[in-house]
Amino acid sequence: MHIKSFKGPTVRDAIKAVKAELGGNALIINTKRLSTGLYEVIAAIDYDLTRPVDLTIPFGRSGGPASGDMGPDGRRGAEAHETPGTLSSGAGNRTACAESEIPAIDAELKELRELKDFCQNIAAQSATEHSRTYRKMEEELISNGVDKRLARKILVSAFNGAGKGKPDDEGAIKSCMRERILERIDVEDPLEGKSPIAFVGPAGVGKTTTIAKLAAVQALKKKRRVALLSMDTHRIAATEQLKVYGRIIGVPVEVARTPEELASLIAMHNDKDNILIDTAGRSQRSSAHMKELSALAALTPGLRFNLVLSAQTRDEALYDSIKGFSAVPYSSLTFTKLDEGPSYGQMLNTAMLAKRPVAYLSSGQRVPEDIELASAERLLNLFMPN
């Protein structure tokens, strides 16, 4: 939806400007007189006709996070890449790809219908309590770090879901908003199974401490057999730190310098219930590091990856991490440093972009107290405090 403000000496002049730029199908959302004496008209149209429309449809989800609902540039989905077996393989494969996109197209159409109904409802009521309630709730979500585009999606769905007969019932709308956010949250515990887990992520996010906390929970509280493996030979005393934790917890700690060595150590500890692997914290833009992690995945087919990110990182940097680490087949997310900032919406933005479940939440340095298994309700209360 394209929303824009127009000003003029009279309401009629402002509306003329609306029609001149957005056309006769534009919806008038609000009109008011400004302190300057001018009149302001807020108008909207479903499509931004002032720019070229990108009609590219992403083929499949092999692109990982890049095919998510939203990105920092505001576009939906990823560019469709011509690869063997998709576009360049003939009409049959193109037809199959197009058919696989039908559910996504149906979802898009549903959103557009909801958006149309919502805009018509606001236009009919003009500058009423309905639009003021919408703006208030939008500001609350955005102030808690939720991306504006995602906030608007949630709000449009919530206002429609609450029913047109209760446009000003803030309680009903908030209840519906919580339901809509819950629908978007996915969580999992990757340590439930016996697959080895490698924790990857940028430098300084707290991977080593996170692994120590999880190892302590699994070994001391759940009485599971645990082994700690480290590939972090770049940071001074990183392996020593993990060895100290291992002695305290009572679990073995091994160090590998190559993916081949790590694969051998994983095989050696095959009798363990959990194998937790610490990797070097490196930039998501380091192609050498990404190749090393990809080689590790290729050598150990059963290996799973968890991407560790700081909850207090800016959206742009989080999106960059999601994009950079997409070279690694990570299956879940962990957020650390929840205790270091007041807003948490960026975690929702990141999880939606990555299309991966959230596994763990870490909020301090105490081992093992300051870590918890993520739950939908806990995340909801972070994204939308009561």
Image (spheres, rainbow, N blue to C red):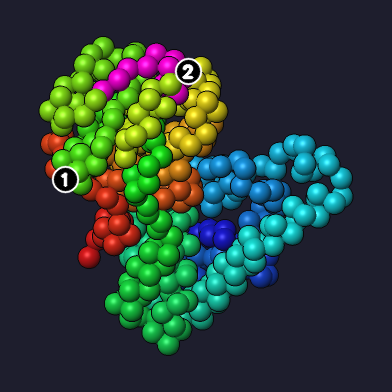
Q: Label 2 amino acid?
A: Glu
Residue 242, given in percent of the width and then of the height, sits at 23, 23
Query: Is residue 259 magenta-colored?
Result: yes
Q: Which mark is residue 116?
A: none
Residue 195, given in percent of the width and then of the height, sits at 41, 40
Apparent side of residue 212 relative to residue 136 in the rendered image (left or right): left
Q: Which residue is denoted by mark 2 in the rendering?
A: 260
| Label 1: how many Cα within 10 Å (few below 14, some 14–19, many 20+) | few
Does dot 2 land on a helix, a strand or a loop? helix
Does dot 1 land on a helix, a strand or a loop? helix
Quadrant including the N terminus: bottom right
Q: Which residue is denoted by mark 1 in the rendering?
A: 221
Q: Residue furthest bottom?
A: 165
Q: Is residue 21 above or below residue 209?
A: below
Report the magenta residues as a range: 253-263
Q: Residue furthest right?
A: 91
Name which quarter of the figure residue 172 lies in: bottom left
Residue under the point 83% across and 42% down: 89
Q: Residue furthest front?
A: 271
Q: Label 1 amino acid?
A: Lys
Q: Is residue 322 visible?
A: no
Of residue 377 and residue 68, the one placed in the foreground of this image is 377
Residue under the point 30% across and 15% down: 235
Residue under the point 23% across and 14% down: 237
Residue under the point 39% across and 13% down: 257
Residue 26, given in percent of the width and then of the height, sits at 62, 68
Query: Is residue 197 magenta-colored?
Result: no
Name which quarter of the figure residue 115 lies in: bottom right
| Label 2: how many Cα within 10 Å (few below 14, some 14–19, many 20+) | some
Q: Are marks 2 and 1 in contact (CB under 8 Å)?
A: no
Q: CA distance from mark 2 to mark 1?
A: 32 Å
